[in-house]
Amino acid sequence: MLIETLSVREARDLLPSVLERFRRGDRTPVGVGSHRKTEAVMVPVEVFDELTAERSRSLAQAAGSLRAEGLTVSAAVEAITERWTRGEISTVEMRAEIRRLYGAS
């Protein structure tokens, strides 16, 4: 997906207009970065909420599958996956933490 990427200075100057676009219902992500290399992405809060809700649904489905097989998810794994759901850690980091937890690094 190709997204518009603003320099940090442009993002600072254009932030009010980007927010106004979001308020009008434009859901198009806007990138921010140095030398037109996207390092962060701004999206309307509704889009962020949808993304985190989708992660929560995925985890609920996975936990349901485990319960159907008579297994449970440990509190430690739940804590790690909750951090992933909120976007605090990446998928790669989540997997690595769970592997370390079970000594499968």
Image: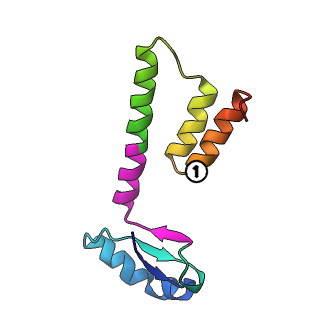
Please check the rendered image and state whether residue 45 is part of the magenta-colored stretch, yes or no.
yes
- Compared across the picture, whether 80 is left or right of 65 comes to right
| Magenta region includes residue 71 | no
Q: Residue at x 40, y 23 (%)?
A: 64
Height in image: 37 above or below 92?
A: below
Residue where numbered disc 1 is placed: 90
Q: Vertically, is 94 above or below 68?
A: below
Amino acid type at circle 1 is: Ser
Q: Which residues are magenta?
A: 39-54
Image point 45% across, 34% down: which residue?
Answer: 59
Taking the view exactly as shown, the residue that stands out farthest to the front is 104
From the image, give the main secondary structure of the stretch colored magenta: helix
Q: Secondary structure at mark 1?
A: loop
Q: Quadrant of residue 39?
A: bottom right
Q: Position of residue 104 (x, y in %)?
A: 71, 31
Task: Give the color scheme: rainbow, by chain, secondary structure or one colour.
Answer: rainbow
Residue 61, percent across and down? 39, 30
Q: Quadrant of the C terminus?
A: top right
